[in-house]
Image: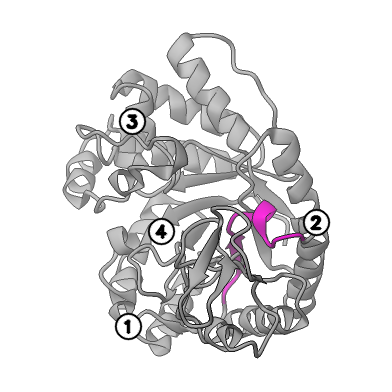
Amino acid sequence: MNKKRIIYEIYSPAFFSDLKDMTDKLDYIEELGVTSIWLTPIFESPSEHGYNVSNYFAIKKQFGTLDDFDRLIAKAHDKGIEVFLDLVLCHTDYHNSLFKESIKGNNDCYFWSDTQIDKKWSYCYENGKFYYSPWSHDMPSLNGSSKKVRDMITNIAKFWLEHGVDGFRLDAVPYISYGCDPIEFWGWFSGMVRSIKSDAYLVAEAWDTYEISNKYARTIGKSFNFEMSGWIKHTLNTGEPLVIKNDPRYDVNFLNNHDMTRISNSVGHNMNKLFKAVDLLFSLNGDVCLYYGEEVATGMYEDCNVKEGGHGDWKVRQPMEWIRVEYQRKDPNSLFNYYKKKIREYKER
């Protein structure tokens, strides 16, 4: 199905207490008018953020059960809202059963060395070897070329698609595997997913130049346009004309996300600039993604700056400010109501 999408990114721990709560909050999603929601990882994981997955086939206990998830999907679809899951395939958690097997030498799903090649290799006390973990010691990198890994990924995709998921946001696609051709991998992945669900929506995170992100989009289907996000903020803060590097066929445009300084901080908490940011975002063609709370300027009076390397990312993952929703809902001139207006106009364009 080729349609214009407006995606709402939900940093799960900050937006809902569990999946039953998220199901209730679909009324808010419907009110806002977006077409789709993207849930950051809800899989079993020892961390709050969930990007180190210990079990791809289980939901984190604090969020509920698979039955709860099925009810969320059913209500979302009844409302015409798509649900996308955040799929992290570059690495797993250290305690993932696949890594435990690999420690014993029982699979080729990770990368091992007898010596520490550089600081990206972490020491494993259980076998005396080093494993490739460029993000963190508790996130060993998966071997995307391994048949066992690809069979597992196929089973993951099939499992969640059969539970009604409409697509996936794909984490850090350029870094899928040590020594692996990422384009080849994502070509395989995209073909596999669409053999299961022909209209599955796939959007890549390739935090790089427009040319790089667009290259992945052509293989995968869609990609977030990070460079365009930068140009929007440049225009807001300098008054210079907007530089447009945007391919409507492949790009998803956005202002901020869970790894970036919130747009309110980026423009110095200037309300006029925040309204203009909405205008610029929706002046572009292609799909759009909003980050939860930007429609009411969540974090408006806080330091929500994320430094290079992701330091301070917790600042942009604070609880959704529902009290601001209640306040702005009653004000016809509020940022919230302006977002609703622009979303409605964009869908009708």
Kindly identify the residue that appears in the image at 42 percent across and 44 percent down: 310
Q: Secondary structure at mark 2?
A: helix
Q: Label for residue 264? A: 3
Q: CA distance from mark 1 to mark 2?
A: 35 Å
User: Where does residue 194 sit, x and y in percent of width and height?
Assistant: 77, 72
Q: Is residue 170 magenta?
A: yes
Residue named by callout 4: 30
Q: Nearer the viewer, mark 4 or mark 2?
A: 2
Q: Secondary structure at mark 3?
A: helix
Q: CA distance from mark 4 to mark 3?
A: 24 Å
Kindly identify the residue that appears in the image at 31 percent across and 65 percent down: 25
Q: Residues within 10 Å of mark 4 (few under 14, many from 20)?
A: some
User: Where does residue 198 sit, x and y in percent of width and height?
Assistant: 76, 72
Label 3 near label 1: C-beta < 8 Å? no
Residue named by callout 2: 183
Q: Nearer the viewer, mark 3 or mark 2?
A: 2
Q: Considering only order in the chain, which callout, 3 or 4, is on the residue closer to the N terminus? A: 4
Q: Label for residue 157? A: none
Which region shows up in magenta?
165-179
Tell which of 102 and 73 is nearer to you: 102
User: Where does residue 12 sit, x and y in percent of width and height?
Assistant: 36, 63
Q: Nearer the viewer, mark 1 or mark 2?
A: 2
